[in-house]
Amino acid sequence: MHLAYSYKACNAPKICRIFNEMGFLSEVVGDEFGIAEEISVPASKIIFNGPYKKREHVEKALIKNILVINVDSKEELDYINRILSKNAIKGANIGLRVRPSVSYPIAPHFGMDEELILKFAKKVIEMGANLYQIHAHIGTQITKLELYKELSEKMSNLAKKIEKEHNIELTINLGGGFALESTPEYFSRDRIPALNEYSLAISSGLNEDKEIFLEPGRTLIGPCAVLATKVISIKRPRNIGKIAIVDASYFDILSSAFLSHEVECISSGKEELLVETDVYGSSCVSADVIRVGAYLPSDLKEGDILLVKDAGAYSINISSHPMRPRPKIFILRENNEYEEVRRAFVE
Amino acid sequence: MHLAYSYKACNAPKICRIFNEMGFLSEVVGDEFGIAEEISVPASKIIFNGPYKKREHVEKALIKNILVINVDSKEELDYINRILSKNAIKGANIGLRVRPSVSYPIAPHFGMDEELILKFAKKVIEMGANLYQIHAHIGTQITKLELYKELSEKMSNLAKKIEKEHNIELTINLGGGFALESTPEYFSRDRIPALNEYSLAISSGLNEDKEIFLEPGRTLIGPCAVLATKVISIKRPRNIGKIAIVDASYFDILSSAFLSHEVECISSGKEELLVETDVYGSSCVSADVIRVGAYLPSDLKEGDILLVKDAGAYSINISSHPMRPRPKIFILRENNEYEEVRRAFVE
């Protein structure tokens, strides 16, 4: 099994470099190909995915022959064909993004239906490229193990069909989407499976030994970060419990709109009694909730510092800063040294 | 009636300056006080709102004596009291943010219940400040006129109570929240009232002549901007209609997740026939929908340019750029000259 770190969960270059140094492959989408280049990821370790790829990045990726470009559409395949001809490139590693017919609503704008995949598999081979893998990704924060079994079954059947027709060997990329155990969704009662349960579900769906690629993002970077924020006001509105307003906002951690991030107070230590407290952001937007029903010290007050846990995924790069500058972000090293982190795409 | 432009709808300084030059008051929240200073808005034209205000901004606002600071919490009032004493300031214009008990779920972290307002009104006067207004804001994209009538009734009753007790005259600030007529919500069947219907509802709730402040944002800036984007792929997935994938994403215009922005093709002019087409963004996030059910030319193809209308509100400053840099933003002047717009808070 090959593991790639999905940059989109947090694509600050210094973070991506750490995963690269740990041995993960780099899964890039959009302009993230440029980040992999910036931090000198070897071509053989780059997986290039997604419906949007900058043309100049695709050309570079083909010339360098990266691990695989997973093609999302006919237009992209046509473009690749032109580049391969123009540069007389043979054996470029091409994958095809499948929109698999599993019992879950796959976003319809990703990948291609099976019939197209079969047609384009033929075309890739005729182009003189190396059809390296088929790729699929069912979504994010998926808690239903049976979906992964179903996916891996369908993908391995599809791979078999293509392999037989063209007498080749394919790898299978099943994307990511694994849920973070410590931060359940507000509105789901599903138990969150452990990581090894996901991997068992996947292997139980395979009909033969296959090289499998997975691209986790949230589960890798999610638990690695905390958001530190200061209490600016305590309120007890009529008919509603206790509220703490903090100086961060959900624009810093949009996932708090649907995930139950744990919140801990690290300053107000005297009072042992914890009481249910709703934590709101201060952005002047009604929906700005950080956490409903956190348990915080009963003597919580202005100036206290709260930590919002598991803040690493889909926050640092997705956060916006509509009414104030974005908070500073640091990597804390084991020797207690700090290093400031910049986002990949700044203005 | 006094009209303030609510910066938070789009707080690019050049945009705020235009509204200032047109005669609107400036309603600022969070660190937006610094934007009003940057573009030299006179103190007498600034309304300072919101649960979070930087302490140094509050101090400056008190020393300059801006039009009004609407106090959101006990902690803020305590701080103001200390500043007024320290600087021996008399007659500073203070307002109080009310969490009114109207038949609509007001976000509980904004303002204070009536009992607290009565208590703090007394305190403001004892502090030697000028209790200038009471303020409330019910939400965003509100389509129910009766809510504005109810709000204006409750607020004018509350004002009367305070005026009688302290023998003063108050103004009433009813915030904004008016819906944009041209972009209904996906999930609401409510007719969107015209602006004069909102104003009639408000005046019908008043029990006497009063100076009223309103703070529209979306309705002012919403229609002033379009998002231009290029089609990168056309797909026709099994059992689903036609899909156009564009190079923008809903991270550029988050409101497309709940508002039906009109989409128009300005390049593919030959074919008169319009067909229902779902427009998806290219960010590699499942939820990245720009518009479901747009009517676009049947021969729409890669490279065509689409305009997403009414893109001015809660987009330019709230947009994030997780997987690629943010698009460029321009003001188009009447003489067809362009001028680039920067966001207020950049990194």
Image (tube, coloured by chain):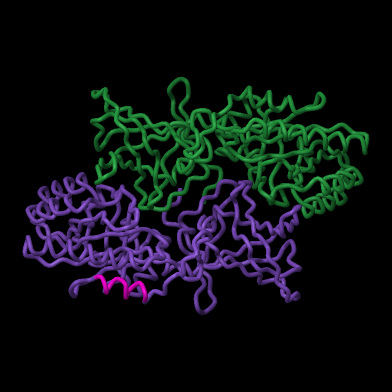
Chain colours: A green, B purple
Residue B23 covered by magenta stretch:
no
Give the left or right position of residue B293, taking residue A309 as reference.
right
The residue drawn where x is 50% and y is 70% is B182
Outermost residue to the top? A335
Spot occupied by residue A280 in the image (x, y as percentages of width and height): 35, 43
Residue in the foreground of this view, choosing between A18 and B1: B1
Spot occupied by residue B278 in the image (x, y as percentages of width and height): 66, 60
Q: Main secondary structure of the magenta part?
A: helix
- Quarter location, residue A242: top left
Q: In this rendering, does residue B16 appear at all?
A: no
Residue in the foreground of this view, choosing between B9 and A23: B9
Give the left or right position of residue B202, taking residue A48 as reference.
left
Above or below B206: residue B233: above
Give the left or right position of residue A177, taking residue B29 as reference.
right
Magenta part of the chain: B197-205
Spot occupied by residue A122 in the image (x, y as percentages of width and height): 89, 45
The residue drawn where x is 55% and y is 63% is B260
Above or below A210: residue B317: below
Spot occupied by residue A344 in the image (x, y as percentages of width and height): 56, 43
Give the left or right position of residue A50, taking residue B18 as reference.
right
Give the mark count. 0
The residue drawn where x is 44% and y is 25% is A337
- Quarter location, residue B164: bottom left
